[in-house]
Image: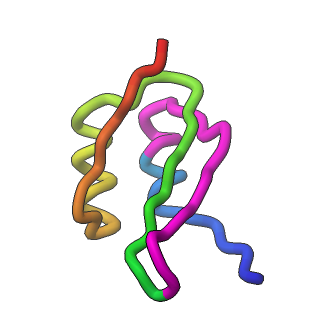
Amino acid sequence: MLFRSNVDVGQILGSADVNIAGMQVSRTKAGGEALIALTVDSAIPSPTLDEIASKIGAAAVHAVDLD
């Protein structure tokens, strides 16, 4: 088991006044690509999503509003 703080994403969201409420991580198979889902308390601005994608080298970053 490993506990790690994703400082880059947390700092970027914090700078945009977006609080992380929870996080889930999954993958399709052992050694496969990971999918990370963050639950946040407010909408994430588009420029913030772009910054996160660039900083972590993500293949894709999408926001979903369930309200």
Viewer-proximal residue, 37 or 47?
Answer: 37
Q: Residue at x 57, y 37 (%)?
A: 39
55 versus 13 height, above or below: below
Give the image quarter of residue 2: bottom right
Viewer-proximal residue, 22 or 17?
Answer: 22
Viewer-proximal residue, 59 or 20?
Answer: 59
Q: Residue at x 77, y 83 (%)?
A: 1
Residue 33, image x and y in percent? 38, 75
51 versus 21 height, above or below: below
Q: Which color scheme did the rendering employ for the protein?
A: rainbow
Q: What span is colored magenta in the figure?
A: 13-30
Q: Residue at x 51, y 32 (%)?
A: 18
Q: Is residue 44 left or right of residue 5?
A: left
Q: Is residue 9 left or right of residue 55?
A: right
Q: Residue farthest to the right? A: 1
Q: Residue farthest to the bottom? A: 31
Residue 6, image x and y in percent? 55, 64
Q: How many marks?
A: 0
Asked whether residue 7 is drawn in magenta, I would say: no
Residue 52, image x and y in percent? 33, 53
Residue 17, image x and y in percent? 50, 30
Q: Residue at x 30, y 64 (%)?
A: 55
Asked whether residue 26 is drawn in magenta, I would say: yes
Give the image quarter of residue 63: top left
Q: Residue farthest to the top? A: 67
Q: Is residue 29 left or right of residue 23?
A: left
